[in-house]
Amino acid sequence: MTTGEESGVARPDALPAEAPVVHRNLRVRVGARELTTLTHDHLNYWLSLLRYVRGGPFMTVARADDGRGAFIQVYRDSDTDYALEVHSGAAGAGYLAATLHDVQEVGQLIWDWLENDRQRLDAIPWKQHPLP
Amino acid sequence: MSVNIELSLTIREIKDERERAGMTALLSGMLESLHLAHDVFITLGENGPDLFVRADSEYPVVSSGYRWLDDFEADLTRRATALVPHARVDFDWVDADGEVEDFDDDW
């Protein structure tokens, strides 16, 4: 899907060749909005619109059935600064924080978190913080 | 009298994720062409086995005097049902008092 950030030639209406991967039963906050369902495209769509949403330019993603309270969240500080934080849900574990400069990378890391793919997440130079 | 309206619509009775992805792209492109991509937001949801795509604004974005609304409703309905014939498009234009607007009465 596109956003107002993109421009291009109109394409004919069509269904995609393959169904996208969908994550349901989520607890997603985007500013004041609550979502339950994300695809990778839809995740990137919301990240591209953070500056316009009511309630603050942030997104928090958690699984509704995760009793540990694990989450990943991002706050858009500027066009080029995104504060990404991850909490494992483990008691007393604190959270990991990093500032990223590419919203596409932010989207990929949040999607990796949903997919339980740690490769790129583990390569980030995180700073450890205690929970407030 | 001009009345500002919140845009709210739902495309229902989508049966699978391919259909929903195609419908989401269609809706996104139409909102972009109307320069509403930063004001009207698209969400995904499920109602039992039926999937839906919803678009709504967080504040009034449309004046009831705007003539493109009729064309927008007709065009979206035509293109959505051409893409997914069993889909249903419902429009719920809401004014500042929370009342559902019927534009046929105005025009």
Image (cartoon, coloured by chain):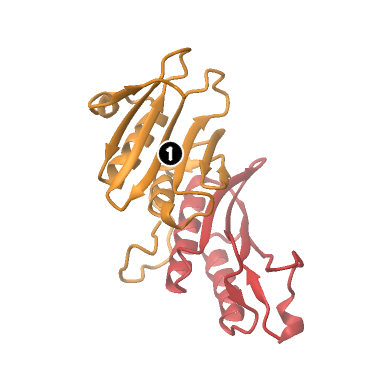
Residue A55 image point, x, y percent: 53, 50
Q: Is residue A115 visible?
A: no
Give the SS element for disc 1. Answer: loop
Q: Chain of mark 1?
A: A
In this rendered view, identify the residue nearer to me: A83 or B63.
A83
Picture colour for chain B: red
| Image height of B24 relative to A71, above or below | below
Farthest-out residue, front: A132
Position of B34 with respect to B53 (left or right) is left
Q: Position of residue B47 (x, y in %)?
A: 66, 44
Image label count: 1
> In the figure, residue A67 lies in which quadrant?
top right
Residue at 38%, 59% (x, y): give it: A2
For the point 48% across and 12% down, which residue is it? A91
- The residue identified by callout 1 is A21
Closest to the observer: A83 or A22?
A83
For disc 1, the neighbor class at 10 Å (few under 14, some 14 to 19, many from 20) is few
Q: Quadrant of the N terminus of chain A?
A: bottom left
Answer with the quarter of the image where residue A21 lies: top left
Q: Outermost residue toward the top?
A: A91
Residue B9 spot, x, y in % from top left = 62, 62
Please tell me whether residue B86 is drawn above or below residue B46 in the rendered image.
Answer: below
Of the residues shown, which amino acid type is indicated by label 1? Val
Residue sitting at 49 percent across and 49 percent down? A56
User: Is residue A11 visible to us here?
Assistant: yes
- According to the rendering, which colour does chain A have? orange
Q: Position of residue A103 (x, y in %)?
A: 31, 46
